[in-house]
Image: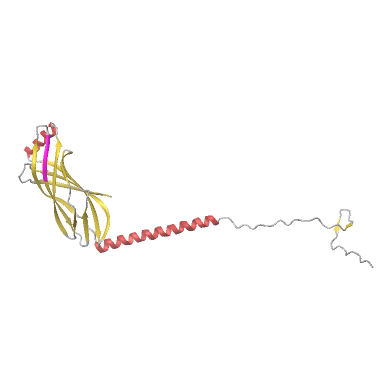
Amino acid sequence: MEESPPKPTYIMHSDNHQTSHRPPPYRRNVPRYHTKAGGGGGRCCLKCICICYIFLCFFIFVLLSLAYFIVTFYRPKIPSYKVADFDVHVFNVKPDFSLYTEFIVIVESNNPNENIDFIYGRGSSVSVLYNDSMLCAGKIPNFRQPPRNVTDISILLSGVSEFGSGLQEALMQNRHSGKIPLLVAVKVPVTVVIGGLALRKINVLVNCSLVVDNLSPNKTVGILSSNYTYGATL
């Protein structure tokens, strides 16, 4: 005896309300992709900026703390300089209006600090000028100045300058009047040493405007007045 086929488990209704045993059309299930909300990259950038600001603030705090410690513990003071003596060895005016000079300038360097040294290095320059014309030049010897110390630095300066008749005449008039204006310009690299730690080297600039009473060789030169200006460069 033959078995009858199983009954369908679905029923479709047509528009004319007639029963149909055809299976429903195949429906494709489209997969759904769940995307994360945007802004992940923005949060990462914001986090990096916050970290950079934190490190910057910490670095500034360390620098300020170090500066406060140096100021309160070491109490740094600026050294002072002055021209203590001025000697003329040679002052020779030649017929071709050139001038050969040899001067000895004694510069007094005073370090008033108790725990700070100064190292005067190479590359220094010292020049003597008259009316913006250089008479002679020299260099400061290398040395290290300890704390609470006063050192007299002897500097030999020499040179030949091309003086015209106008400058020679003005210089001779100043010599006769006993008031000769000169400018001593000093530039010297200095390294500051605090507690045995050498800091960055700086260039100390000193300009000394002098008025002397004579420039005669082997005769005592009197310094009538002096005026100093200071500066520094990295």
Instruction: Give the side of residue 74 with respect to residue 91, left or right.
Output: right
**Residue 3 location, quadrant:** bottom right
Q: Quadrant of the N terminus?
A: bottom right
**Residue 76 location, quadrant:** bottom left
Q: Residue furthest right?
A: 1
**Residue 108 vertical placement versus 2 (above, below):** above
Scheme by which the image is coloured:
secondary structure
Q: Residue furthest front?
A: 1
Q: Provide residue 105's location: percent of width, then percent of height.
A: 12, 48
Instruction: Give the side of residue 7 with respect to residue 226, left or right.
Output: right
Q: Provide residue 197's location: percent of width, then percent of height.
A: 27, 60
Residue beneath the point at 41% across and 59% down: 55
Nearest the viewer among 10 and 183 is: 10
**Residue 117 vertical placement versus 1 (above, below):** above
Q: Provide residue 123's location: percent of width, then percent of height.
A: 22, 48
Residue beneath the point at 35% across and 61% down: 62
Instruction: Give the side of residue 213 with respect to residue 19, left or right.
Output: left
Overall secondary structure of the magenta stretch?
A: strand
Residue beneath the point at 43% across and 57% down: 52
Asked if residue 30 is among those painted magenta in the image, a careful observer would answer no
The tally of labels here is: 0
Magenta-colored span:
98-103
Q: Residue furthest bottom?
A: 1
Q: Provide residue 67's location: percent of width, then percent of height.
A: 30, 60
